[in-house]
Amino acid sequence: MKNEKILKGGTNAEDVILINGVVHRSKGPNPELSQAVLKHLEKHNFSFAPRLLGIDDQDRLMLSFIEGEVPRGEVLSEQQIIDSIKILRAFHDINSLSPLCKNQETICHNDFAPWNVVFNNEQPVGIIDFDELAPGQRIDDVAYFIWTFLDFGVSTVSDDELIKQIGVLCNVYQLQDKGKLCDAFLKQQNRILQFRKGIVSNEADESKKAFSRGAVKRINASIQWVQTKGHLINFNL
């Protein structure tokens, strides 16, 4: 008898099932790239990504299971966020060695957010959901990471503290082109804003539409925060 469990991490929970200790999930929009990247990460002993185990009889990916929990609305500590961005840096460094980058700096995750990081004993131990992988620039992934982990614009943390945390994370990552960070924030925010607006306009499921309506409001608040505080961010980096 199969022991099946729907996994609730990531953004496609209904499509990700744990069967007898192995994760089964759809291949996603770019299966060739995602599988190649997972193999590359394994080759270079990157321990924070699942291992590709094969394809099942329903043409789904079979992946090793990363034990832990994915945060959903929990407030993460500064150290947890710092440890997470160190994983992003390692992810970029290893992927920068791959010919899959083409003429870009690295392979970006493009959704390296709290809902795609697995924590165990309060430590980040893995990343999931590689559907959005694409060659790109490090700063875009870093901007998306900082935005989603600090949640500025809707966070209850003071502006001064948020700006300080942004500087700390940039230094931990050792980001080179800090002067472009605010532009990268706005680029990522507008990317997701258009995605959420598309769901509001075209999705038949009312619960998904409602979630995206709320997301649109939060993203607009984040955009406004960057537009009004960006000069302070640049001054402190």
Image (cartoon, rainbow, N blue to C red):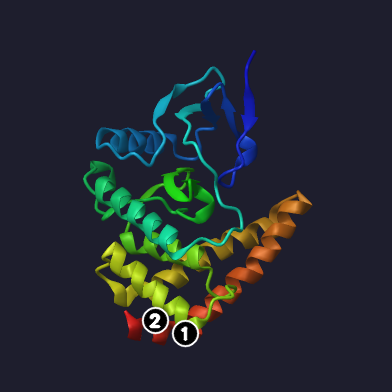
Classify 177 as above or below 39: below
Percent x, y of residue 119:
48, 47
Q: Is residue 236 left or right of residue 13?
A: left
Percent x, y of residue 184:
40, 69
Q: As shown in the figure, which amino acid type bears the numbered disc 1?
A: Lys
In the rendered image, which residue does mark 1 sit on?
229
Pointer 2 with pointer 1, Cβ within 8 A: yes
Q: As shown in the figure, which amino acid type bears the numbered disc 2?
A: Ile
Percent x, y of residue 187:
45, 68
Classify 27 as above or below 191: above
* Residue visible at 37% across and 42% down in the picture: 48
Percent x, y of residue 192:
54, 61
* Residue visible at 41% across and 66% down in the picture: 143
Classify 161 as above or below 106: below
In the rendered image, which residue does mark 2 sit on?
233
* Residue visible at 48% across and 46% down in the picture: 121
